[in-house]
Image (cartoon, grey):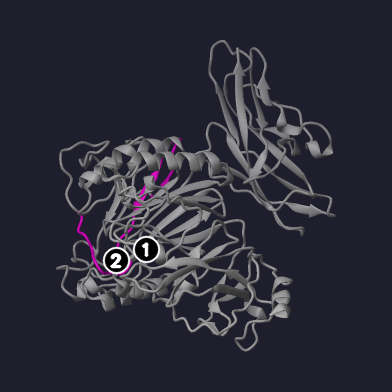
Amino acid sequence: MWLSAIAIGTSAAIGGFAAAPAMAVDSATLTGVILGVGANETQRIVTWYSSTDTAQSVQVAPTSALVAGEFPADAVTFTAAGSANIATSGGFNRHATISGLSENTSYSYRVGSEGNWSTTAAFKTQSFDGAYDFLFFGDPQIGSSGNTAKDGEGWNDTLNVALAANPNAELLVSGGDQVETANTESHWDAFLAPEKLRQYPWAATIGNHDVGGKAYEQHLYTPNTDRSGAYYSNGTPASNTSGGDYWYIYKDVLFIDLNSNSYATSQGGGGDAAHVGYVTDVVNQHGADAKYTVLVYHHSIYSPADHAKDGDNKTRRVDFPTTFSKLGVDLVLQGHDHSYSRSYEIKNGAKANPDEQPGAADVYPGPGGVIYVTANSASGSKYYDITAPDASGTSGAGNGADPLNPSSYWYNSVQNQEHVRTYVKVQVQNDQLVVENVRSGTCAAPNAAVELGKVPWCGPNSGATAAQPVGSIVDSVSIHPNHGDGQEIGVTVPTAAPGEFGWTIDGHNGLVDLGTAVEHDGAYFEANGQLNPITVSDTRHSVAPWSIAASVGDFRDGSNTFSGKNLGWAPKVVQTGAGATAGDSVRSGYDGGDGLSVSRELGSAAQGHARGTAKLGADLDLKIPGSVDKGSYRATMTITALSN
């Protein structure tokens, strides 16, 4: 025992600690293993059931270290915690957090104890920086068709289809309602059956069909979870209900997940006010550590189908949006209504831009603009048909018609129901979020609601058009975040090796991307590019002098920073006119001085200059000390115009 413990403990390459082997072989039956999301990309949480109350753990090793399927002697173990299940579940629950993972590495793991390990499963980490994709799944609700096996087949097929098409997706995000009946373990068994749930991390969300028992909490342990009474619908965490709000950061996205079943204080919990306070606190504490903020909860407040006019839905539609706009939320992902919708840009509970067209492929939300997405059924167990607007109003809690598309609700840019399974793919890119609703099935089996005659038709246009193929896209939108009144300048610092650099300019107040900095002899990194041109138009009769100046704040990636003084420029007149002359060049502060950390003139014109329009630009030169940590950094350039 002593030698074994020493061998394991001295080789904990990815964190954790070793547990001494049990004195006797444990004969526990181990079931329901699922890989969950951790607090960040270096963690995963594994949850499972055990038939006996014994000490157990997760054992982890790089897959390359396994020989003939056997774990090496220096495999790392992470001790599990847990408790007895409720009577309807039987047995005990266990969970353990795997920490200290390395990027771009395949890992194998198993749960249990020495002499009684589960079947080995595997997962792969990707780069811990840069763009990535995650998949969002609405309401598997296994058991809701009345045929658990058929529901499970559809669910398993959607996961297989989605991950065959997107094998490098890094998260599977839940819209809630994993099962039809909260404490029916046969429903949970079918939900947990797919192997993909042991290979990709599941970020769970509580639905109204999950909340009425403890099985959700027993099966799906989540990170950073506040289990205070305020986040339980009845205010009592010890009761036979599940609850809690939680958050995590994964590669520049702050995810906040809410238990939307708790929405009214009359039930005993803290209601919507508690969730508003929670989101506010999390964004204030951690929002600066991420580039995007994504909220996830079950009850869709801008849905188009059976639940569109529910009273609790309307309550949240009044309680949530203003706070979400104020806090700069980018995207809200929801379930519950078993249909797909994508909202217009919503600000403070109203359509932000009356001219935004239905189905726009690109949207440019201004400050406070939020996009809300509702996911359709991922299993095919149940679909809800889209309902008709009424005369209750076109803002706030109203369900009135869209003036641009009267058959839709005022808040929705896209509404869709074809009675086929779908999932949502979200691409997290440097300067946009791309959201796509993708078909994972057709009218053919597995599609329980269609097979069992729960719906009378199948296919686009209420069945008038033949079903489209698996993998075809129902809806796609690119969300371009607003960068305020200035320009943001971004640069990726690589590991210590030469890299390429480049520019992308989208012309919509977008990111100035300096690309990947190049290392110079280990001493410093350098990146070059050009400022988005700034147009100056002056047609005043006074032809008074004017000037444009700018300064740059610190570059930041989460908690890592370096000074804006490292950025220098060489101003230029891109298009002559308005008497424009370029400002003086400023060296990077790496070579001495303050660079652009203090206000510098980009261009100006003297008294009596010619009227007209000019465009000012600048060549940018960023030099960064070689000691700067790897990451994707951004800084905000503040532009000031002065004129008499």
Q: Earlier in the sequence, mark 2 or mark 1?
A: 2
Residue 115 shows in the view: yes
Q: Which mark is residue 141?
A: 2
Give the image location of residue 202, x and y in percent.
Answer: 45, 64
- Dividing the picture into quadrants, the one containing residue 455 is bottom left
Q: Please rate how many residues cluster around mark 1, counting C-alpha atoms within 10 Å: few if below 14, some from 14 to 19, many from 20.
A: many
User: Outermost residue, front direction?
Assistant: 23
Q: Identify which residue, 79 or 504, lies in the foreground.
A: 79
Majority SS type along the magenta span? loop
* Residue found at x 60% / y 86%: 69
- Dividing the picture into quadrants, the one containing residue 311 is top left
Q: Amino acid at mark 2?
A: Gln
Give the image location of residue 642, x and y in percent.
Answer: 61, 18
Q: Is residue 376 magenta?
A: yes
Relative horizontal placement of residue 18, taking residue 85 as reference (left or right): right
Q: Nearer the viewer, mark 2 or mark 1?
A: 1
Give the image location of residue 370, x and y in percent.
Answer: 40, 42
Is residue 635 depicted above or below 147 in this figure?
Answer: above
Label 2: element kind: loop
What segment carries the magenta color? 361-386
Label 1: element kind: helix
| Cα distance in 3D space between marks 2 and 1 | 13 Å
Relative horizontal placement of residue 250, taking residue 470 as reference (left or right): right
Q: Amino acid at mark 1?
A: Tyr
Q: Which mark is residue 237?
A: none
Q: Which mark is residue 216?
A: 1
Residue 356 shows in the view: no
* Residue found at x 19% / y 58%: 385
Is residue 379 depicted above or below 625 in this figure?
Answer: below
Q: Is residue 194 magenta?
A: no
Q: Quadrant of the N terminus?
A: bottom right
* Residue found at x 34% / y 65%: 178
